[in-house]
Image: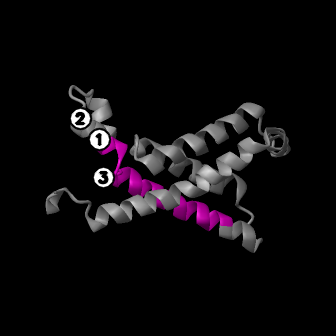
Amino acid sequence: MKSVSSRPRLVDLMLLLGRLLLSLIFLHEGSVLASDITATVDTFAQLGLSAPVAFATIALQIGAGLSIATGCLCRLGALALAFFCLATALLFHTNFASQNELLHFEKDLAIAGGMFVLAASGARAISIDRLLRKRVTGIHPWLKAVL
């Protein structure tokens, strides 16, 4: 029988739910981009971006999205996506005469804010990071700082 102290607390369950919801948009978008790579590369080319940038974007969205969802190197994944959202807002959604562009700008800023909060807090109790921290001895100080 588990003791009361070993059960996940409400804050940890809420953080897990928040991580899953935040990661969903990136996992979905990354998988959509990957599912039709030719169209993705063409769309990126129309924006003046190269195929390697398209591939890097897919890798970032899926990789960091999984990082946040699983809580594996969550702080790094959240930080990467925070800067990605800031860049996306500032590079692609600055036509504030368009209500839709303004909405996307604000959405990207809000998601970046959530990612910065997650980068500061870490994944906490319900995460692969916590399992690693508890079970692996002799972790390099750099890795310990991001878990």
Q: Residue shown at 35%/51% (left/top)?
A: 123
Tell me the CA gap for discs 2 and 3: 15 Å
Disc 2 marks which residue?
A: 135
Disc 3 marks which residue?
A: 124
- Say which of marks 1 and 3 sits in front: 1
Q: In the structure shown, which secondary structural element does the residue marked by tag 2 occupy? A: helix
Residue 15 lies in the magenta-colored region: no
**Front residue of 134 and 101:** 134
Extreme residue toward the bottom, this view: 99
Q: Residue shown at 51%/45% (left/top)?
A: 66
Mark 2 residue type: Arg
Residue segment shown in magenta: 104-130
Residue 142 location (% of width, % of height): 31, 31
- Say which of marks 2 and 3 sits in front: 2
Mark 3 residue type: Arg
Q: Residue shown at 21%/25% (left/top)?
A: 138
Q: Say which mark, if any, is on residue 18.
A: none
Disc 1 marks which residue?
A: 131
Residue 88 location (% of width, % of height): 65, 52
Q: Residue shown at 51%/61% (left/top)?
A: 21
